[in-house]
Amino acid sequence: MLQRRERTGIQKMDVIVIMCIGVLAGKFLLPRNLNRWNQILQVVCTLLLIFSMGVMLGSRENFLEELSTLGIQSVIFFLLPSVGSVLLVYPLTRHFLEHKKNGKGKK
């Protein structure tokens, strides 16, 4: 069965392909002396993206009614990966730093 195409016309695989093209362009085409300008451009584009998402959410008719549901889902989607990452990274960091301090790690 064919899946319906998203309204924007951009599928998930398109985003991955565009990101990979950007990685290759950054690796092979962008001179090192433009890295600082690229970082500034990234911040500006991120701020523009956040702003446009806010405008989109604010234009919804039922936004205030949906906010409680969205808020709970957002907390869950934030909290679970964050706690999981800390629970995984903290013991691993302690383990590897202890090995490095004792001279057991690779030099």
Image (tube, grey):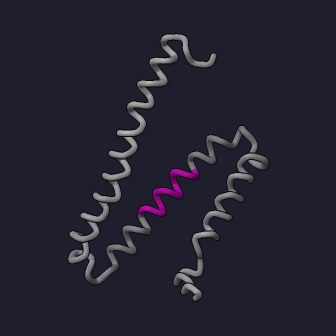
At horizontal 40% and vertical 39% (from top left) the residue drawn is 88
Residue 56 found in image quarter: bottom left
Residue 50, above or below 81: below
Residue 90 found in image quarter: top left
- Give the position of the C terminus as an image quadrant: top right
* Count of marks, rendered view: 0
Q: Residue furthest top?
A: 102
Closest to the observer, 5 or 58: 5
Residue 47 painted magenta? yes
At horizontal 66% and vertical 42% (from top left) the residue drawn is 35
Residue 28, above or below 104: below
Closest to the observer, 68 or 93: 93
- Give the position of the N terminus as an image quadrant: bottom right
Give the image location of residue 37, x and y in percent.
Answer: 62, 45
Q: Main secondary structure of the magenta part?
A: helix
Magenta segment boundaries in residue numbering = 41-50
At horizontal 41% and vertical 25% (from top left) the residue drawn is 94
Decide if residue 107 is on the left or right side of residue 7.
right
Residue 39 painted magenta? no
Residue 84, above or below 67: above
Decide if residue 16 is on the left or right side of residue 27.
left
At horizontal 74% and vertical 52% (from top left) the residue drawn is 24
Give the image location of residue 9, x and y in percent.
Answer: 59, 81
